[in-house]
């Protein structure tokens, strides 16, 4: 059994055609000399093409009775064994056998078997070979050089070392996997705990929302009860005897017809000769939120106005020219007194603005010569131009610290007025002509009036109405 010829590319040469046996080509091993040939060359020749083989066929023939074992082609990485046609360790041995065979002229089969023996393999998968009785194996042991034996030993050591390293890496990998499992388990426990906490918080949030909804319902119910009580008090006190307006007589008022709003604005009255305007909080199912521009302008006989607590704005010239208006009841909730809102109300003697009022526009009380007393709420921040112009009867007014802006001529022609200011000096934002008549100013004065200006309740309204009736 001789060695195999190899080309410069390292491939084994077919001894029939003289070409390389490529890794993707099917080949045949002679059963006697183990020489490889192209499958096609073997079929055409009809047998072995190795002159040193006893099965050598000197000429081409179609007789294929001496056909050797046909194996599938190697894959791209050469990982299929020539002998067993299977993948595995034998393919590694085969590669090394090619290297050693080209140098030492030892039988390929013998070298493969010797290496398998060195690795403790008693037989190759798919082949019934007893290594102890194999002549090829014995020949490899006898003919193998010391260098070959040493190379085999080195290969075995390397394989053993590699095996130990693989086992070590496998153990380390197993340990890492175990740590990862433990970490995942801890994370899972935390996630479960967080999910339980989230569920608890969600339930608590739902409970709080239900309580808030319940409280809102209770507040709404109380508001309705309060309005009902106010209306009852108004009716029981006999306000209806004036015959103009009762708390539920909403047909006397003209309201905005806007469909997209949930509230409404009073923009006028059906009869300019009314004497009493007790405005209901709801008209046609909508809350009354505003007294519109010129709504009661020039109602010459109007004497009493009572606003509901739903109103937030008294518009421009809303009560201008109401010359007989002597009493106005404003509930907490109004935030703005519009431009000229009570201009020319020459019979108005007293008015209290609740703490909700923040802005008083110019000319709001212009020419109200009978106005003797006005109480500003604690939240007023702006007093407009000529707001109190010509209020001859106004003897005193207290300006709280909240006022950050006073326009020019705000107190012009208030001949008997003394101004008391909570601040110790005027602010730079006040107009330099805010007090053009040079009325006396007492700075740093605390409000001595202990009356509550936060709003007017139903009982106060009834009391005010009684006073109004006694003066009628």
Image (tube, rainbow, N blue to C red):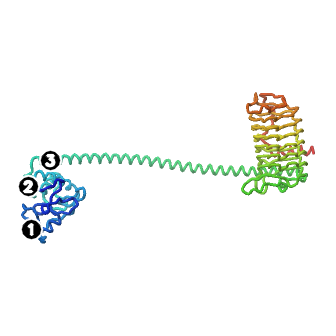
Neighbour tally class for label 3: few under 14, some 14-19, many 20 plus, Cα within 10 Å: some
Q: Nearer the viewer, residue 169 or 393?
A: 393
Q: State which quarter of the image contains the N terminus.
A: bottom left
Q: Earlier in the sequence, mark 2 or mark 3?
A: 2
**Residue bearing mark 1:** 59
Q: Residue at x 86, y 32 (%)?
A: 417
Apparent side of residue 174 relative to residue 358 in the rendered image (left or right) = left
Q: How many marks?
A: 3
Locate residue 328: give its quadrant.
top right
Question: Which is nearer the N-term, disc 1 or disc 2?
Answer: 1
Q: Which mark is residue 139?
A: 2
**Helix or strand or loop: what does disc 3 sit on?**
helix
Q: Secondary structure at mark 1?
A: loop
Image coords of residue 218 (percent x, y): 71, 50
Q: Which mark is residue 151?
A: 3
Q: Residues within 10 Å of mark 1 (few under 14, many from 20)?
A: few
Question: Can residue 93 be seen from the camera position used here?
Answer: no
Q: Which element carries disc 2, helix, strand or loop?
A: helix
Residue 397, by quadrant, is: top right
Do the residues under discs 3 and 1 have CB atoms within 8 angstroms? Answer: no
N-terminal label among 3 and 1 = 1
Compared to residue 201, the image places residue 126 above or below, namely below
Distance (Cα) linking label 3 and label 1: 40 Å
């Amino acid at each position: 059994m001789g060695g195999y010829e190899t080309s410069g590319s390292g491939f084994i040469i077919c001894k029939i055609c003289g070409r390389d046996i490529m890794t993707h080509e099917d080949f045949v091993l002679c059963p006697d000399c183990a020489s490889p040939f192209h499958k096609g060359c073997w079929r055409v020749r009809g047998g072995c093409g190795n002159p040193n083989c006893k099965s050598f066929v000197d000429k081409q023939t179609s007789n294929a009775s001496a056909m050797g074992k046909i194996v599938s082609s190697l894959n791209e990485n050469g990982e299929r064994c020539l002998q067993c046609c299977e993948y595995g360790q034998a393919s590694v041995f085969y590669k090394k056998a090619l290297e050693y065979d080209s140098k030492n002229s030892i039988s390929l089969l013998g070298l493969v078997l010797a290496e398998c023996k060195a690795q403790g393999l008693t037989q190759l998968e798919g082949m019934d070979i007893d290594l102890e009785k194999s002549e090829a194996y014995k020949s490899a042991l006898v003919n193998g050089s010391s260098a070959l034996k040493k190379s085999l030993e080195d290969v075995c050591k390397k394989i053993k070392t590699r095996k130990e390293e693989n086992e070590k890496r496998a153990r380390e990998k197993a340990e890492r996997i175990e740590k990862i499992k433990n970490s995942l388990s801890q994370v899972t426990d935390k996630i479960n705990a967080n999910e339980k906490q989230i569920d608890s918080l969600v339930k608590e949030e739902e409970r709080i929302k239900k309580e808030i909804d319940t409280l809102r319902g209770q507040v709404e119910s109380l508001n309705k009860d309060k309005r009902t009580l106010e209306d009852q008090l108004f009716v029981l006190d006999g306000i209806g005897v004036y015959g103009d307006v009762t708390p539920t007589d909403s047909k006397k008022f003209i309201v905005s017809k806007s469909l997209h709003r949930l509230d409404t604005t009073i923009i006028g009255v059906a009869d300019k000769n009314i004497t009493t305007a007790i405005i209901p909080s709801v008209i046609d199912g909508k809350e009354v939120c505003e007294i519109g521009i010129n709504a009661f302008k020039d109602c010459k006989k109007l004497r009493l106005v009572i606003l509901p607590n739903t109103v937030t704005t008294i518009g421009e010239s809303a009560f201008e020219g109401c010359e007989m208006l002597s009493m106005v009841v404003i509930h907490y909730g109004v935030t703005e007194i519009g431009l000229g809102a009570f201009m020319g109300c020459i019979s108005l003697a007293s008015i209290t603005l609740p703490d909700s009022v923040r802005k008083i526009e110019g000319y709001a009380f212009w020419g109200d010569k009978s106005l003797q007393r006005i109480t500003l709420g604690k939240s007023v921040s702006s007093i407009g131009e000529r707001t109190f112009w010509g209020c001859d009867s106004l003897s005193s007014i207290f300006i709280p610290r909240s006022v950050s802006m006073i326009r020019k001529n705000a107190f012009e022609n208030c001949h008997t007025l003394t101004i008391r200011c909570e601040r110790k000096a005027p602010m730079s934002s006040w107009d330099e002509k805010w007090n053009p008549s040079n009325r006396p100013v007492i700075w740093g004065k605390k409000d001595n009036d202990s009356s509550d200006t936060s709003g007017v309740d139903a009982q106060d309204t009834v009391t005010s109405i009684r006073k109004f009736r006694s003066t009628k």
